[in-house]
Amino acid sequence: MINESEFIIRLQDPKSKEAAFRELLQLYKERLYWHIRKIVISHDDADDVLQNTFIKVFRSIDKFKGDSKLFSWMYRIATNESITHINKNAKRLQISNEEHQTNAINNLTADVYFEGDAIQLKLQQAIATLPQKQQLVFNMKYFEDIKYKDMAEVLDTSEGALKASYHIAVKKIEAFLTSD
Amino acid sequence: MKKDKLHNIKSAGFTTPKNYFESFDDKLFERLNKKESIEGLESTGYEIPQSYFDSVEGNVFKRLNIEEKPVISLLSRKTFYYVAGIAASLVLLISIFTNTEVSEELSVEIVETYLEERNLDSYELAQLLADVDLLEEDFTISNTPYDEDNLESYLLDNANLETIIEY
């Protein structure tokens, strides 16, 4: 594991910035991609948001004070960028965010970058029925196995509230999966 | 093992195009550099007439002098309070006067129909009465002596023969 504070210094120093940034990309691009992908659903949207996220990270790394972990900070940017992206798309199409997400899920069967079987599709449909916060908590805990402590930093919510959200989300999803 | 149990679903099923992650860095840097070069531009290319900004102030004041009529915004806070105050007192006045005129006494019929239409069952009624101490004096005791005659006529008028037979 690299020393984070040294790494941040290298990221902020104009001389070493690009090299350090390439390292940062190697370390986090896949994890952030999967995090974003589960929020925005389609690969093209995820690609857009991932690029925007890293551009924002590159631009604002100088202002990063280190009061949270680099990883939580980037996750927070990625989460906000994803939600902004959905809002923007929904507004452009003049539909609600929920409708937009339902449409995205309905398009999954035709998506070449979705290889899930019927039950995986149903899981995505189940997740889409949850409120946004619960979706985030569920994805982060279930698929990404992020600790509640880190999640609390990313989502700016207490651990207790996150645990409750996750519990409710799982209950709702299980009910959805067993229903027909 | 049931397939549709949540804990049996290990992945979301999403995939990416081939070599997506390998080519991502270059694509990103290309975009970063392009943006950087745009941001590096010092001027937008727009030009203004010479000493334009010096004349702005004078022009604005010139127009202010011509159009020097005090403009009172209808939406100012002070007027809003006045209007709201007047409106509130009007509403108050109207409601006081109309209420006194229309005031209606609660008649037995009103209470009766109210109770009938509410469909209160005896249980609910009992709940309403639970907090009230019932005293003997509260019940009016009729002074009519019951003798055979008026009992008979009462039953003839009020009782349904069939219900009595059923018992």
Image (cartoon, grey):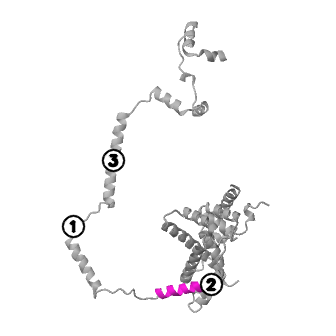
Mark 2 → mark 3, Cα distance in angstroms: 72 Å
Circle nearer the viewer, 1 or 3: 1
Image vertical order of residue A128 relative to residue B57, above or below: above
Q: Position of residue B68 (x, y in %)?
A: 21, 70
Asked whether residue A158 appears in the rendered view, the answer is no
Q: Residue furthest right?
A: B1
Q: Position of residue A101 (x, y in %)?
A: 58, 65
Identify the residue position indicated by label 2 in the image.
B23
Measuring 33% from the left and 51% from the top, which residue is drawn there? B85
Asked whether residue B95 appears in the rendered view, the answer is yes
Side (left or right) of B14 relative to B115: right
Share a chain, discs 1 and 3? Answer: yes
Identify the residue position indicated by label 3 in the image.
B89
Task: Name the mark on residue B69.
Answer: 1
Residue A31 found in image quarter: bottom right
Q: Which subunit holds the residue at mark 1?
A: B
Mark 3 element type? helix
What's under tag 2, amino acid-wise?
A: Ser
Q: Which subunit holds the residue at mark 2?
A: B
Nearest to the observer: residue A147 or residue A66: A147
Mark 1 element type? loop
Share a chain, discs 2 and 3? Answer: yes
Q: Of the residues under marks 2 and 3, which one precedes in the sequence?
A: 2
